[in-house]
Image (spheres, helix red, strand yellow):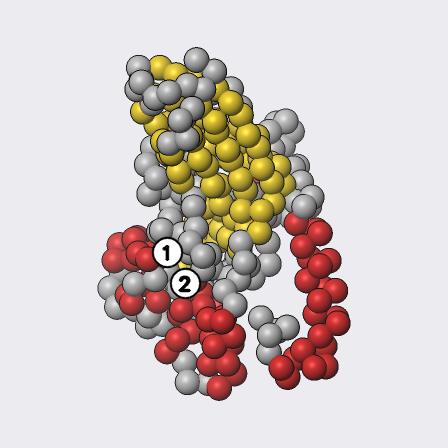
Amino acid sequence: MMRRDFNYAAVYGRQIKDSALCASCHTLFTASIEILEPAVANGLLEIPVRVTNHTGHKLPTGFPSRRMWIHLRVVDAEGSLLFESGDVDANGRLRLDTAHTQAHCLATSKPGGAEDYTDCYEPHHDVIESPEQVAVYEAVMGDVRERVTYVLLYANTYLKDNRLPPVGFDRGVLGTDSITGVFGRAADDPDFSPDYPDPLSGSDLVRYRLPVGESARPLAVEARLLFQSVKPAFAEMLGESQDPRVTRFVSMYAQVPPPVEQLAQDERVLGP
């Protein structure tokens, strides 16, 4: 974004380019993704996928606009797509972003209670059985009435925080109201980063279940771990602001939507 903006590029062009390259290199060592042993039972293929955090902090960390997710594809021997979850369009938008960027989700001032906004973000998933479900790792802020908010000054709690903790994380030593804990459905998921010294600390296991029937074998499975620095809801929420600095940022964002970065990848071929 800054490289394309003349006022920034003219003065800081070289530094911006070097910083972008450095940040891109760091993402290559942040996490791994592994397709474990799939199994077929009663016409359903179950594909366990494990994501492991290799950093010393939650992943993704930093400003709560960031998100990380699993893109999983299953293709049969004839090249037909049997299942896909977590695919994005040319602008880096997931299919679920359409629902999450509705006007009532993005409004700064919200009427009603928390139950009116449960459709404004993707919950944590232990099992995924539909292409409409996506394993998204992120922090979702809530205001004092536990309604989703993207305004930092309104934030009072986390409605969802399934950012992957680092290896060694032990929620048992944290206070129950600690902002460094795990919030939402992930808190009750036994496969989500068991407390240290469990060897699976810092990882999460997601099970994908899909009907395969008489699909031509072998089946090719691909899992990619993707990252985005600014998800659409954060940028589109700024649209109602008249501040020239904000409108400038929104204009820059529209020209260069934050790219989707691949952090890790794994593939597996399932025989007859």
Q: How would you rate the neighbour count of disc 1 (Cα within 10 Å): few for under 14, some for 14-19, many for 20 or more?
A: some
Residue 7, can we see it? yes
Residue at 32% across / 36% down in the picture? 130
The picture quadrant where one finds residue 110 is: bottom left
Q: Position of residue 171 (x, y in %)?
A: 56, 40
Residue at 71% across / 52% down in the picture? 25
Q: Is residue 85 left or right of residue 213?
A: right
The picture quadrant where one finds residue 34 is: top right
Secondary structure at badge 2 equals helix
Q: Is residue 20 left or right of residue 39?
A: right
Q: Position of residue 105 (x, y in %)?
A: 32, 63
Q: Gap in Å between the C-alphas at discs 2 and 1?
A: 7 Å
Marks 2 and 1, the one that precedes in the sequence: 1
- Foreground: 204 or 27? 27
Please name the residue that numbered disc 2 is placed on. 233
User: What quarter of the picture does the C terminus occupy?
Assistant: top left
Residue at 43% across / 62% down in the picture? 232
Q: Residues at badges 2 and 1 in contact (C-beta under 8 Å)? A: yes
**Tag 1: amino acid:** Asp
- Foreground: 83 or 125? 83
User: What quarter of the picture does the N terminus occupy?
Assistant: bottom right
Please name the residue that numbered disc 1 is placed on. 97
